[in-house]
Structure formats: C-alpha cells, structure tokens
Amino acid sequence: MRAVAMFPKEKVIRVVDRPSPQIERDRQIRLRMLEVGVCGTDHEIARFQYGLPPDGEPYLVMGHESLAEVVEVRNGSRLKPGDLVVTTVRRACGKPECRPCHHDRPDFCTTGAYTERGIMRRHGFMTDEVIDDDKNMHLVPRSLADIAVLTEPLTIGEKGLIELDSVLVRMPWVDPQKAESRGLNAVVLGAGPVGLLGAMALLVRGFKTWVYSRESATSERAAWVEKVGAQYICSSDLPVGDLQKRVGAVDLIYEATGSAALAFAAMPSIGHNGVFIFTGVPGRETEVTLDGRKIMRDLVLQNQVIYGTVNAGPPAFEAAIADLAKFEARWPAQVRSLITGHYPPEKITEVLAGEPGAIKAVIRFGTPSAAKTGTATTGGKTGGTNRG
C-alpha cells in the first residue's frame, strides 16, 4: 500500500510501498483512509524541524487529520463496515505515574512520553490502510463526509472552549450553556484553518466575534469572515494593542497564529475577567520582550485567565463533529470553502510547497463507498481546487 513518508536522516519526503497492516486483537479496526488534511505541523515535519519515526524505523508515515471508512472489524467492536470515522492522534505514555493517561486522556499527559500518529514515534494516517483500536475512533455522519476531515483541526479549539466553559461558570451572570445569554466579545488572532474554525465555533456559542489577521480587508478571507457573521480587522489598519478601540471590552482572545510577538502584544487588550487562549506553538522567532510587571498586575487586578490547549481527547472530537453539523446547517458554502484543494498522495511535494491563498489542502486516498450511501461520493476534483 502507498504511504507518504518523511525520512529524517535523508531529509526527503516520498511515497513508499508498505505491507498492509494486520489486525492482531479484538476491537481493532481496519480502516480504508479517505482523506488526510495537511497542516502547519506537517509543514514543520516536512522542513525536518519536528517529528520522529517509530523507534528503530527509518521513516515516519505522516498525517494526523484523518477521515476513514471502516472495512473490517474484530470481535467486540461497536463499529461496523461502512462507518465513517475520524481517529484521535495521541496515544497514552503507559507510565504508571501518569494519571491522565491512566484515565484515557493522553492529551493531558504529564510525562511527555506519549506517542502521536503521524507526528511523534507512531506512523500516521497518510496511507491507504490503517489499523487502530475502536476506542480511538469517532463516528461521523455520512452527511458530513465532505467536510469531516476538518474535525481534528477543529478539536484544538473545541478543547479550549470546553475548558472556557469551566472558567465562565465562575460568572453567575453568564450561562455557558445558553449562547444567547453570553453577551461576550471574542477576538480571534489569525485567519488560518484553526482560526477560522475557531471563529465559527465562537459564533455558534453566541460570541460577538472579530478576526484579526494580516490579510487585506478586501481579501477573500476577510470576505469569508464577514459572510459567517464575524467582523474582520486587518493588522495593517489597526495595531494589535488597540483592539479595544474597535471591539470595546475584549472578553476573550483566541490565539491561532503561533506568533509569540503578536500574542503578547495583544494581551493588554483583554478586559476585566477576560480570558486568553493559546493554541499556537511559536516557531523560530526573534526574542520577545515582555512587560512582566504589567502582565502580572493585570492578571491579578482584573481577574484574568490565560491557558494553552494542544491535542485533544474524546470530548473535543465529539464536540467538533457536533459543531461541524451546525456549521454545515448555518454556513454550508463557507465551511466547504475552507477545503481549498484535494490532491493524490503523489502530489505531496507540491502540496507542501504551498498554494497561494490555500486554507486547507487535503490528500485524498479514496472516497466513501457509494454502495453504503446510495448517493454520490464527495465533491472536489483530485489534484484541483474546490473553492466551495
């Protein structure tokens, strides 16, 4: 079977031929991979700045944003052939002292010895077939087949928003379960996939939402933001430290850029009782100078909260699938337009080189079995662009 592999010693990425995996125990599932999204982490792996092969192997099979179809099940599984699933990425460290992993929440692993499919010491999903335990899989409705590959990048925001609800309950005048009662302002930093998906997640939760990014106010992304009901701010038009002049009270900043300089420049804009969520991991930036006294003073005197979120566990995957259904019902064209191209695995080099204006490129290995759906398979032209 085909697999897109990263060879760290040779510093090359190429499609290799691998033996098909075999089911070894009950509740394992054989998956036929359909689509695998390409994200910033994959680009870092392709630059050989990140990612490790499994111990003793010369390469890492890439890919962690997946959509697959079940083709074979073993005794005890809740899934059946024909089901569409997305699969979690991180696997438990197995260390007895790690309480999160012992409770099947490796996204909170405390030892750092976890593995991640397609990223860290475990082969990923960018291949024709995969075998994994059914506990790591989440059922996707067939109606979402053409956008379900967006589930994993959405889970990063979902995890952060699940944690946000636990923060908001400290405010008796805000009911996290009722979107109409929130009355809060949110600013998303960045108009990449995580930022735009996060903006929709905030909108369906009742936040008045702004997206702050470097693209022109007349760009396609700015227009996309306006079409979903958020407001767009171009960084050239407003310094990030002046967000309150445009937004008013900033109750939440949702960072989705990976830029430490931008994030900490925005931090003084958080208002009383405000929350700042970090989702990005900084690259090799220049040194950032911070006013630590002001940050500490504001945190204390304004009851502010700052936290980071990475990877995601089962609750975030279930929330992402539920939210994708809401996005599809409310903004069908906009959510589909986030996927800007489908490509065969043999085009991986071109995909990693990047296409101007691309939001989410997807490597396509197949389409859902028509016999299982009775309808046409997902849209988009292989190797082309599907703007939605």
Image: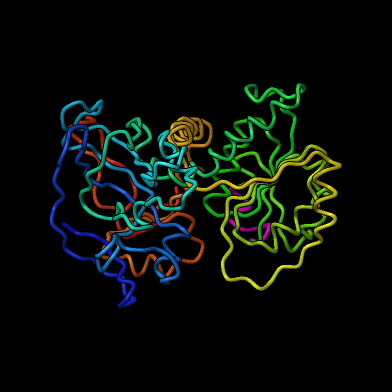
What residue span does the magenta drawing correspond to? 215-224
Q: Verify whether residue 299 appears in magenta.
A: no
Q: Is residue 313 above or below residue 6?
A: above
Residue at (16, 50) in percent of width and height: 21
Quadrant showing the N terminus: bottom left
Q: Is residue 147 above or below residue 241?
A: above
Hey, which quadrant is residue 9 in on the image? bottom left
Seen from the viewer's position, the closer of residues 272 and 105 is: 105
Q: Verify whether residue 221 appears in magenta.
A: yes
Extreme residue toward the front, this view = 97
Seen from the viewer's position, the closer of residues 77 and 142 is: 77
Q: Is residue 179 above or below residue 381?
A: above
Left or right, residue 252 beside residue 135: right
Q: How many marks?
A: 0
Left or right, residue 192 beside residue 150: right
- Could you say where residue 260 lies in the image, as x and y percent from the top left? 66, 61
Seen from the viewer's position, the closer of residues 360 and 53 is: 53
- Could you say where residue 360 lies in the image, as x and y percent from the top left? 45, 54
Residue at (69, 45) in percent of width and height: 306
Extreme residue toward the bottom, this view = 10
Residue at (34, 69) in percent of width and height: 349
Hey, which quadrant is residue 19 in on the image? bottom left
Residue at (35, 59) in percent of width and height: 384
